[in-house]
């Protein structure tokens, strides 16, 4: 650090040197509030009232709006990412390491993060940005180091490179462009939502109301919206985590499945990738995930 060799024996030693990290997988306690989670990472946390005011100030100054009293379990993935970043900023870092910070963010949330990083860099903070998203690397970074199989295989100014050249260094071969065949005719309706409505789970939820949708084989259908506007609740209803009042509110291949659970819908040929991967969509360990996903489907 600062041209001097250092030995970093623990996360506490790294923080003492001014190094902070925003992890790809969040380290938050869902049962605690935003302020309580941040307090756990600060060695000299003052009263909760003072800390809450500080969180409001920092989150407002860096355009990362947070309610210090909100419970983490009630927040979207994008809002949880803000907690990690604000917690990092409150440690007054000189070097911030970010591991795939946009992997769970919407494009709008990513744009806000980029503005925050550019401001931090302008204030003299060093940022080590780990990502495989080449557009982000070209947009943000002034220097890039490319790793392959754990070894450095190249370095460059990414602003002067094409995405294909960066990708080729990453994989060790030329990367061909993927072409989509638009001539395939749409098939039968695979997923149908018929006047889907749900009651609110809690005062903070935004339940779907009178949603109608048909997705045919061969189609890619997008559902867009600002975070916290019912996407999670809609996903839960489609995946079977939340049962609908009517069985025909959700149909898979023409069969009513609204009252069926996740396993039954998997057996019907559906598969689901939730917003939060670790803990919700997967557990650590490849083999464990395969067993958990397929043990009841017979595949």
Image (cartoon, rainbow, N blue to C red):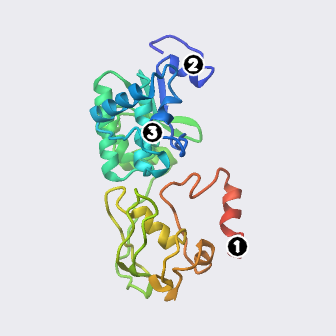
Q: Residue at x 48, y 15 (%)?
A: 1
Question: Which tag is nearer the camera, tag 1 or tag 3?
Answer: 3
Residue 145 versus residue 124 in the image, above or below: below
The dot on residue 218 is none
Would residue 252 be visible to someone looking at this image? no
* Left or right: where 112 falls relative to 29: left
Compute the Cα span from label 3 to label 2: 24 Å
Mark toward the start of the polypeptide (3 vs 2): 2
Q: Are marks 3 and 2 in contact (CB under 8 Å)?
A: no
- Residues 128 and 195: in front is 195
The residue tagged with tag 2: helix, strand or loop? helix
The residue tagged with tag 1: helix, strand or loop? loop
Q: Mark 3 Cα within 10 Å, few/some/many (few <14, many 20+)?
A: many
Residue 222 appears in which quarter of the rendering?
A: bottom left
Percent x, y of residue 79: 40, 46
Percent x, y of residue 252: 50, 83
Percent x, y of residue 202: 45, 59
Mark toward the start of the polypeptide (1 vs 2): 2
Would residue 100 be visible to someone looking at this image? yes
Compute the Cα span from label 1 to label 2: 46 Å
Percent x, y of residue 60: 28, 35
Mark toward the start of the polypeptide (1 vs 3): 3
* Left or right: where 65 falls relative to 297: left
Compute the Cα span from label 1 to label 3: 37 Å
Numbered circles on residues, count: 3
- Residues 65 and 126: in front is 65
- Residues 38 and 139: in front is 38
The dot on residue 13 is 2
The dot on residue 34 is 3
The dot on residue 296 is 1
The residue tagged with tag 3: helix, strand or loop? helix
């Amino acid at each position: 650090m600062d041209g001097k060799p250092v030995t970093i024996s623990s996360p506490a030693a790294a923080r003492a040197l001014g190094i902070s990290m925003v992890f790809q997988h969040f380290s938050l306690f869902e049962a605690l509030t935003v302020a309580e989670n941040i307090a756990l990472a600060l060695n000299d946390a003052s009263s909760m009232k003072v800390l809450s005011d500080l969180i409001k100030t920092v989150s407002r100054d860096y355009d990362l709006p947070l309610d210090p009293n909100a419970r983490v379990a009630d927040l979207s993935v994008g809002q949880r990412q803000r907690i990690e970043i604000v917690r990092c900023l409150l440690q007054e870092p000189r070097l911030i390491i970010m591991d795939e910070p946009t992997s769970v963010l919407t494009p709008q949330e990513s744009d806000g993060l980029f503005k925050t990083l550019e401001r931090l860099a302008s204030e003299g903070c060093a940022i080590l940005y780990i990502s495989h998203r080449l557009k982000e690397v070209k947009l943000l970074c002034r220097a890039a180091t490319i790793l392959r199989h754990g070894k450095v295989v190249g370095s460059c100014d990414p602003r002067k490179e094409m995405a294909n050249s960066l990708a080729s260094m990453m994989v060790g071969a030329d990367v061909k462009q993927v072409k989509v065949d638009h001539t395939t005719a749409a098939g039968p309706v695979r997923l149908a939502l018929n006047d889907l409505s749900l009651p609110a789970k809690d005062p903070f939820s935004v339940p779907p109301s009178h949603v109608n949708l048909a997705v045919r084989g061969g189609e890619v259908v997008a559902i867009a919206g600002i975070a916290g506007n019912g996407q999670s609740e809609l996903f839960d209803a489609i995946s079977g985590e939340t049962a609908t009042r009517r069985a025909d509110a959700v149909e898979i291949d023409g069969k009513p499945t609204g009252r069926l659970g996740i396993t039954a819908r998997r057996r019907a040929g559906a598969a689901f990738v939730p917003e939060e991967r670790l803990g919700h969509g997967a557990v650590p360990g490849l083999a464990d995930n395969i067993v958990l996903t397929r043990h009841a489907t017979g595949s």
